[in-house]
Amino acid sequence: MWDVSHALRTPAQAHELLSFFLARQGRLRGFRFKDWSDYSTDQPVPGVKFATAQVTSTKFQLQRTYSSGGQTYTRTITKPVAVTVRLYNTLGQEVTSGWTLDATTGVVTFASSPGYVPTWRGEYDVPARFDVDQMQMTLDDAEIRSWERIQIVEVLV
């Protein structure tokens, strides 16, 4: 869950947020959200691995694994930022062809079985939605509007 509350500085910014909120009909429709504290494999985080899980001999699901002490949590990455994703073979060499990525599911498909489970690097978003159905924007001044407590929650797939 995230709280992205802020003061909007202009009526144009308020209108942009209002349009985004109304187009998603509050909680009804999800969207891609960048969690700036956890969005990239380039972040130096101890105990984090970036691998794929084999779905079939040619399909692999992007994953991120977090470990601390004896506990492990594996997160399925379903919203990769396609232009940033790079795949690697077991020798750590980048695989530049022979595969495609579905940026709406995080599934990598090879043209033929690679014979190994690839690892990956790149950025990803979180599937999210608003956690309210009504916008509570306030008019702080003739030219300044704000919306406190903009709650966003992850959509678990």
Image: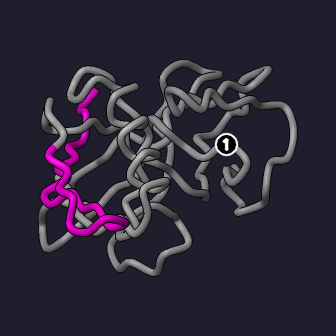
Q: Where is residue 131 in the image (x, y as percent from the top left)?
A: 15, 38
Q: Please count the marks in the image.
A: 1
Residue 26 figure quarter: top left
Against 113, is 1 above or below? below
Along the line of sight, the residue nearer the viewer: 150 or 38 = 150
Q: Can residue 3 be seen in this view?
A: yes
Residue furthest right as drawn: 97
Q: Position of residue 33 (x, y in %)?
A: 40, 48
Q: Position of residue 52 (x, y in %)?
A: 50, 42
Against 19, is 49 above or below? below
Along the line of sight, the residue nearer the viewer: 131 or 120 = 131
Residue 135 figure quarter: top left
The answer to whether 79 appears left or right of 31 in the picture is right
**Magenta part of the protein: which range?**
136-157
Q: Position of residue 143 (x, y in %)?
A: 37, 66
The answer to whether 90 appears left or right of 36 in the picture is right
Q: Quadrant of the C terminus?
A: top left
Q: Is mark 1 on a helix, strand or loop?
A: helix
Q: Which residue is drawn at 67% across and 42% down?
A: 82
Q: Is residue 89 visible?
A: no
Can residue 144 be found in the magenta stretch? yes
Q: Name the residue under label 1.
A: 82
> How did the renderer colour the structure?
one colour
* Amino acid marked by disc 1: Ala
Q: Residue at x 12, y 66 (%)?
A: 70
Q: Which residue is drawn at 59% across and 23% down?
A: 59
Task: Give the crowd class for mark 1: few <14, some 14-19, many >=20 residues within 10 Å.
Answer: some
Can residue 6 be found in the magenta stretch? no
Q: Residue at x 50, y 27 (%)?
A: 105
